[in-house]
């Protein structure tokens, strides 16, 4: 698939937010989600001795804790070739129809997982 410019503007925005989160902290992964009202939440992973969460899990948790009732889309920026099954499951719990976008660190879209 091609770059972010081929996406709709809202999907390009969450990829940009995920890239920014990743770059800001030097994290391996960045993620962002968009809820049913268009609000966005961006995050990186948490890797503490007592708590380990992926970037997508943190972004979904931020959305839930802010009152989101569902998700429209999620983006993961990573060097990995695919999102983990647990990340996709986490997104689908709040957004059964949400598209999960996987992008390279430069923003190039690698995959779009439709429900």
Image: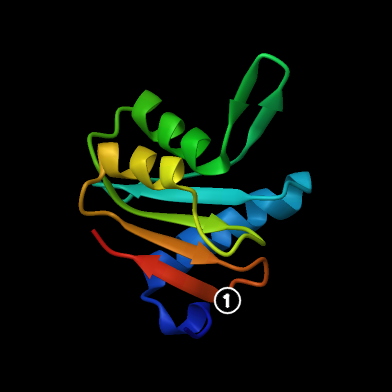
User: Between 58 and 38, which is closer to the camera in this rendering?
Assistant: 58
Q: Residues within 10 Å of mark 1 (few under 14, many from 20)?
A: some
Q: Quadrant of residue 80?
A: bottom right
* Residue 112, percent from left and from top: 38, 68
The number of discs equals 1
Q: Quadrant of the C terminus?
A: bottom left
User: In the picture shown, does residue 54 fall above or below 51?
Assistant: below
Report the coloring of the rendering: rainbow
Along the horizontal axis of the image, is 38 left or right of 6? left
Along the horizontal axis of the image, is 94 left or right of 50? left
User: Between 96 and 9, which is closer to the camera in this rendering?
Assistant: 96
The structure residue drawn at horizontal position 73% and vertical position 54%, both measured from the top left corner, is 23
Among all residues in the image, which is located at the extreme top? 50
User: In the picture shown, does residue 101 fall above or below 39?
Assistant: below
Q: Secondary structure at mark 1?
A: loop
Q: Which residue is mark 1?
A: 108
The structure residue drawn at horizontal position 41% and vertical position 37%, both measured from the top left corner, is 60
The structure residue drawn at horizontal position 43% and vertical position 63%, both measured from the top left corner, is 101
User: In the picture shown, does residue 4 fall above or below 44?
Assistant: below
The structure residue drawn at horizontal position 56% and vertical position 63%, both measured from the top left corner, is 16
């Amino acid at each position: 698939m091609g770059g972010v410019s081929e996406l709709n503007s809202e999907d390009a925005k969450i990829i940009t937010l995920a890239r920014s989160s990743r770059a800001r902290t030097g994290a391996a992964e960045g993620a962002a989600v968009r809820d049913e009202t268009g609000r966005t939440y961006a995050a990186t992973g948490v890797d503490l001795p007592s708590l380990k969460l992926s970037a997508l899990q943190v972004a979904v948790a931020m959305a839930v804790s802010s009152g989101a009732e569902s998700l429209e889309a999620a983006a993961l920026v990573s060097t990995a070739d695919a999102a983990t099954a647990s990340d996709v499951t986490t997104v689908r719990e709040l957004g059964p129809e949400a598209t999960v976008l996987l992008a390279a660190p430069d923003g190039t879209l690698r995959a779009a997982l439709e429900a």
